[in-house]
Image (spheres, helix red, strand yellow):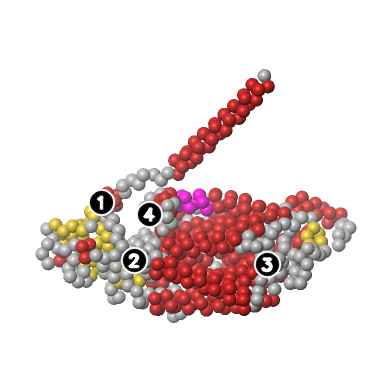
Amino acid sequence: MRQPSKPEQRGQQRVFGNFLLHFRPRSVPERTLKLTLTWGLGVVAVVMVFLLLLTGLLLKFTYSPFPGSAYDSVTHLVNQVPFGRLLRNVHHWAANGLMLVVFLHFLRVFYTGAFAPPRQLNWVIGLVLFSAIILSDFTGYLLPWDQIAFWAITISTSMLDYIPVVGAGFKEWLLGGSEPGPQALMNFYAIHTAILPVVLLFCLSFHFWRIRKAGGLVIPRSAGEDPSVRGEMVDAMPHQITREVSLALLVFASVLVVAMLVDAPLAEQANPGLSPNPTKAPWYFMGVQELLMHFHPVFATLVIPVFLVSGLISVAYISYDTNTSGIWFCSPKGLKMTGVAAIFAGLATVAAVLLDEHVIRVNQAGPPDMVSHGLLPFASVLAICAGFYYLVKKAFSATNNEAVQALFTLLMTAFVTLTLIGIWFRGAGMKLEWAGS
Amino acid sequence: MKKETQSRRSFLNKLWIVLGSVAFVELFAGVLAFFKPRQPGTSALEAQSIITAGPVESFEPGSVKAFIRGRFYLARLEDGGFLALSRSCTHLSCTVPWVSDQNKFVCPCHSSEFDIRGEVTNPPAPRALDLYPIKIHNNILTVDTGSLKKRSRFAAEQVTYPDSV
């Protein structure tokens, strides 16, 4: 495969060899270059992170992290500074795009079984990166100090009140007082522009290094193929690098076009006396907001997230019946089970939301308690999950790889469904309504 | 001679560990002190915590009036009694507006609902709206916004009645 190169090509290779190949191997298995393995999602995410770092660095020169001037500094940036609006839009849309892309990347890694040894630790690092990105998006939209920002801070810090022992103290530290003010904005500014970028860059390097330690990406294969066959190797330059660079340019161009066409939202200046009606979180938090409407706050802010995160971490450490890494959806049977789980979860989630809204809430008076609105619904959800796992495993006489995959699909579909209900079917007073009605 | 060197070395090693630990504890305590929230000072708003709401007759029974500066609602129940309700939702602190044509407070964040007494009529809010103490002197109502009273449910003794109803 390696051909004798012309002198000018050698020059190019030296540039790329010295720089890019520093964290790329010289040669890669040809099969891992297939688009249907990665969909380029990791590369897209990295490009967006760098776009965010660069635009963020520039934004730091005009932003003023004080409640009295933050909002004005943003309107000044948008209306007076040359290319200021474009810069803010690129930062905003890259942040939103990154959220979507890392979620898809996370799904891709899961459904190709790329969390199995030797990639266990990298699955966890990926989860840490995902959390850091969620926190970055969250702390970022607090900074303009508009109505979205003020009420997001109020709601999220109030959630800490329901976390026993450490919650109240942490809230006091974050806010620096009883309500969001100068200290809160300064804290979020420091977290957003210093702490999280450092965490992101550190974990990203760790993430890449673990990929190399694992011998590159997982090798895509069909169910019958031997996982130890790596196939033909090709030079990273040009086969991998040119693909990555062209994808990076495509991402950059797409973000730029969106940023030119659509402005990043900026609500009215923060008003502590008036929550907008309805007060909706950004789209990526609507699932959590919907959860908060149905569960006792202790469950929505603490119990459910703890269960979810421990479940996601343990995905990589369960002992599985077979090795399915590199096989999309484990097997054709696994794909069928994934479909069943998705359809069931979508319908069940809609049914549960309607049941809570139109039957349970109507028939109860007084404040919710931990049992009727926490333990009972949570135990029912756990029971449904456990029941589903055993039924689907038995019905398809499946391996635990396929059954765990179905359970994961169940939870992810439920979360996505809650998010969509929140985005499109909640109107004034956060009442259920048909979109557009 | 050899033994002496060894004991000196192990002594110095222990000294390093002890000094290192002390330095670490100092550093940790220093960072904690650095991050300790400042003592909340009394803002101008808190200094004037007693708000004069007005004479008893100016509030219709069954009506709710918002006091923007005091951050509370003065609710007069049908039986003539008064409650000063905090405007913050007990769920996650959003400001709850009074919807007069439906006779209830509706939270715009997570759709909790409260009746005129501040009692929860729709979850997820876990407690009735917080109260501020009311005093009635010479037919004039004052509300002390400096002392917030938390409660789980509405109870009759929370209501303040004018001297002569």
Amino acid at pointer 4: Glu
Could you say which quadrant of the image residue A214 lies in? bottom right
Judging by the rendered image, the residue that carries numbered circle 1 is B48
Badge number at residue A179: 4
The C terminus of chain A is located in which quarter? bottom left
Residue depth check, mark 3 versus mark 1: number of the one nearer the observer: 3
Dot 1, crowdedness within 10 Å: few (<14), some or many (≥20)? few
Q: Secondary structure at mark 4?
A: loop
User: How far is disc 1 from disc 2 in space, using C-alphas?
Assistant: 23 Å
- Reply yes or no: does residue A190 show up in magenta: yes
Q: Chain of mark 4?
A: A
Tell me how far mark 4 sits from mark 1, CA to CA: 18 Å
User: What kind of secondary structure does the magenta stretch mostly adopt?
Assistant: helix
Kindly indicate the quadrant of the structure image that contains residue B60. bottom left
The reply to whether the magenta stretch includes residue A187 is yes
* Residue marked by disc 2: B96
Please name which of the two marks, 1 or 2, marks the residue nearer to the observer. 2
Q: Are marks 3 and 1 on the same chain?
A: no
Q: Earlier in the sequence, mark 3 or mark 4?
A: 4
Residue drawn at (57%, 78%) of the image: A343
Q: Is residue A179 visible?
A: yes
Magenta range is A185-193
Q: Nearer the viewer, mark 3 or mark 2?
A: 3
Alpha carbon separation for disc pair 3 and 1:
69 Å
Q: Is residue A50 above or below residue B18?
A: below
Residue shown at the point (45%, 75%) measured from the top left = A353
Query: Tag 4: Cα neighbours inside 10 Å, few (<14), some, or many (≥20)?
Result: some
Q: Which residue is label 3 attached to?
A: A321
Give the distance between the C-alpha atoms of the residues marked 4 and 2, in whole angstroms. 16 Å
Residue A142 lies, in percent from the top left, at: 47, 58
Quarter of the image for residue A98 reads bottom right
